[in-house]
Image (cartoon, rainbow, N blue to C red):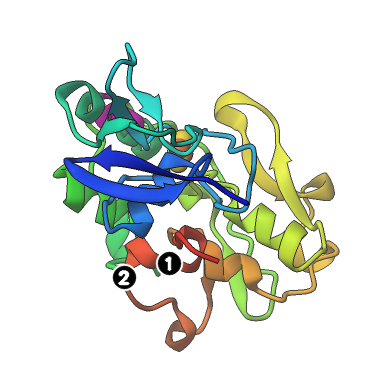
């Protein structure tokens, strides 16, 4: 039987299952922490976006809430000077490798980056970090959707949907550092790969990287609650 513990997040006492990750406990209780790469079902989060920092009383440095299991008596602050600085820096680094032509983006006004920027009052523009210029060809080879890598935030949600839900394995990460991309085997266009065009990957993309060609099928609703971002299920 799982043990229940009590934690305090932003002065609110919350009961949850011991060992659950702090990020999901906060989200399920209506306390927002920015996040891009976390997937609830993943037991070992890759913690690559670095957006989900929080402070824990008695811990020297801010920690990523997607990797931190809760413990009895834990006292957490989701905002502090240090947390806000770290989140801003991580966010600006993500922006430096993101096509910021929002008006031309199919996810405009329905994008998790826009939502985080608004929530944290961070300007959606290249600021401290120069934009990383990478030339990507648009992959519009599938019949109903397209993949614009210049908008990909490398969260890995499409890869998980493809592998764990669709059970196909058409896409994965390739290369390292600033050259990291989501791609197919041998970088083939999606239509020439083993992709079955089930489009589960499109549904979990939190930005406008994977999008439906027909706008009426575009994702709708609160961008902080897009399918790949849900705290339950
Ligand atoms: Fe924790 Fe990305 S959500 S590092």
In this orientation, which residue lies closer to the viewer: 137 or 109?
A: 109
Can you give x and y, in whole percent of width and height, for residue 214 in the image?
Answer: 50, 84
Q: Are marks 2 and 1 in contact (CB under 8 Å)?
A: yes
Can you give x and y, in whole percent of width and height, for residue 213 in the image?
Answer: 53, 78
State yes or no: residue 31 in magenta.
Answer: no
Q: Is residue 233 left or right of residue 125?
A: right
In this orientation, which residue lies closer to the viewer: 48 or 42?
A: 42
Q: Which mark is residue 222?
A: 2
Q: Is residue 68 left or right of residue 27?
A: right
Counting labels gives 2
Can you give x and y, in whole percent of width and height, for residue 222 in the image?
Answer: 31, 70
Whether residue 189 is visible to the viewer of this picture, yes or no, is no
Region in magenta:
86-90
Q: Which mark is residue 62?
A: none
Q: Which mark is residue 226?
A: 1
Classed neighbour count for the residue bearing mark 1: other residues with Cα under 10 Å, few (<14), some (14–19), many (≥20):
some
Is 141 placed above or below 158 here?
below
Residue at x-position 49% and y-position 35%: 69
Residue at x-position 51% and y-position 44%: 20
State yes or no: residue 88 in magenta.
Answer: yes
**Magenta stretch, main secondary structure class:** helix
Can you give x and y, in whole percent of width and height, for residue 84 in the image?
Answer: 21, 30
Q: Is residue 155 left or right of residue 100?
A: right
Residue at mark 2 to residue at mark 1: CA–CA distance? 7 Å
Residue at x-position 55% and y-position 51%: 39
């Amino acid at each position: 039987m799982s043990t229940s513990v009590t934690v305090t997040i932003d002065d609110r006492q919350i009961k949850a299952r011991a060992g659950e990750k702090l990020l999901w406990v906060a989200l399920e209780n209506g306390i927002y922490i920015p996040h891009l790469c976390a997937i609830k079902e993943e037991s070992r989060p890759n913690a690559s976006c670095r957006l989900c920092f929080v402070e824990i009383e008695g811990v020297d440095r801010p920690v990523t809430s997607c990797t931190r299991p809760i413990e009895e008596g834990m006292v957490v602050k989701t905002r502090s000077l240090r947390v806000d600085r770290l989140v801003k820096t991580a966010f600006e680094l993500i922006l430096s490798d993101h096509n910021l032509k929002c008006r031309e983006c199919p996810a405009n006004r329905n994008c998790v980056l826009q939502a985080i920027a608004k929530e944290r009052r961070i300007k959606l523009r290249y600021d401290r970090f120069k934009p990383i210029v990478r030339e990507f060809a648009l992959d519009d080879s599938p019949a109903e959707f397209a993949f614009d890598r210049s908008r990909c935030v490398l969260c890995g949600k499409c890869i998980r949907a493809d592998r764990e839900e669709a059970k196909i394995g058409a896409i994965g990460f390739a290369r390292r550092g600033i050259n990291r991309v989501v791609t197919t085997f041998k970088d083939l266009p999606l239509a020439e790969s083993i992709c079955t065009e089930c489009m589960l990957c499109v549904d979990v993309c939190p930005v406008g990287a994977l999008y439906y060609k027909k706008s009426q099928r575009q994702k709708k609703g609160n961008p902080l609650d897009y399918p790949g971002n849900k705290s339950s299920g």
